[in-house]
Image: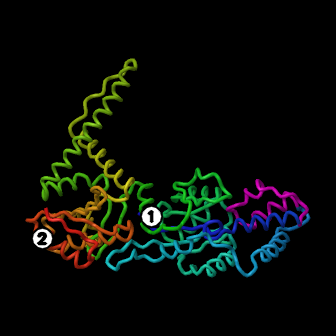
Amino acid sequence: MLKAVIFDMDGVLVDSETVHLECHKRLMTKLGLDYSFDYYKGFIGRTAEYMWRTMVEDFAPDKTWMDLKNISDKILADLLGDEGYPEIKGAAELVRNLCNKSIGHENIRHENIKLALASSGEKDRINAVLERMGIKDCFEVIVSGDDVKNPKPDPEIFIKAVDKLGLKPEECIVIEDSLNGMKAAKAAGTICFGYENKFNSDYSYADCVLTGFEGLDVRFFKQEYAALTEEPWEIFDTERLYVREFSRDDIPELINLYKENSEHIAKELLETVKKCERKSERESEKKSEKKSEKKFEKKSEKKSEATAQNDGYEEFYRYIKSMYIYYGFGFWGLYADRNQGGDKEPVLIGSVSVYCKDTDMYVGYIIDKRFRGKGYGYEGVLGTCRFLQDYFGFEVLNFEVEKNNIPSIRIFEKLKNELGDTIVLEII
């Protein structure tokens, strides 16, 4: 599960690299040296001290790294003036959005996401930048270049940030713009999102590449993390429920839910699984035929019924995942009793589905018979409607209800009272 986002600062929150490049050019001129971007590029993502020490070794043995720092600090102060570094568009808004754990309604919540900053910059400069942007208090942990011995691409800075957060590396996303930073993030064991800028063209170490921050939110990071780690996306919580994607292991339980509560839908699901089984068998037979062409290769034995069914479940799960990947919505599970009864696993009590007919969006749901009459249906569907409106911008949501399904008609009438004309009820 995603538990933290760790930001780099230079090139991610502020466009400091443009300023630092100009500063480097003027420093080289003062030293009587020719400027080379290829030389400068090797320092992006590393500490300034590392750059000055290297320059002393390469070009100025008669000076100390502190001499270069003092010259550079004066040049930088002149370049920045009173305005400071230009902010990356949408960066401050994204940090505030992630810091605010709500997604718009009191009864729809996300699990808390911690924020950290891990920058090769000096601590005083980091604090000044964050205070100017008004986001310093959003970060639970700040690790600077002053806090580590080894600069990026060494993973020390991210390992330290993860440790201070009290988390595991695989529970964190790092946002980095430099190749050295991305190498460090991956070496630390985190998920890495590369932020695209003009100073880097190599994003081979990034799991995902961002071209901008505008419009990004908690949902985006949770959904991308789920896709990359193949974990079910945890969509939102209500007071008694939590809603998430189905995992591969949920498929048998999902089918049993519909067998017990909706024979019609269960039949459709089982037919889909059977189709997936047949598809899996055909692919297996093709592989077997290719193998049999080799000398002394034994023919594969026919799959057992249980194996075929498991493969069918696997194909069915891939089908469900493709719905999430292509549309961002589809088929979600409703789980109850989370965080109750100690280590008790959450119970699947129903599902909600979102589907398109022509250009209209429809929502459907089912609740296990054992949990009906307790308000779970209304709670789950209300949360789903609000989530779809907040995050996907659906202005109108449609519901088809059979005329003899009085409990569902009452739920949707209650929804209409709560959400107004955004709910359209069709009695069939």
Classify residue 36 by image quadrant: bottom right
At x 72%, y 65%, the residue is 18
At label 1, the amino acid type is Phe
Identify the residue at the far left of this view: 404
At x 82%, y 68%, the residue is 65
Instruction: Compare residues 356 and 137 and report the one nearer the observer.
Output: 356
* x and y, in percent, of residue 22 in the image: 78, 66
Determine crowd level at label 2: few under 14, some 14-19, many 20+ residues with C-alpha closer than 10 A. few
How many marks overall? 2
Instruction: Compare residues 82 and 289 and report the one nearer the observer.
Output: 82
Task: Read off the residue under disc 1.
Answer: 220
Image: magenta residue range: 30-59
Mark identifier at residue 257: none
Task: Read off the residue under disc 2.
Answer: 407
Classify residue 340 by image quadrant: bottom left
How does the figure colour the protein chain or chains? rainbow
At label 2, the amino acid type is Pro
Identify the residue at the far top of this view: 295
Quadrant of the image containing the N terminus: bottom left
> SS at mark 2?
helix
* x and y, in percent, of residue 412 in the image: 19, 72
Vertical position of residue 139 compared to residue 425: above or below: below
At x 89%, y 67%, the residue is 30
Please tell me whether residue 41 belongs to the stretch shown in magenta. Answer: yes
Determine crowd level at label 1: few under 14, some 14-19, many 20+ residues with C-alpha closer than 10 A. few
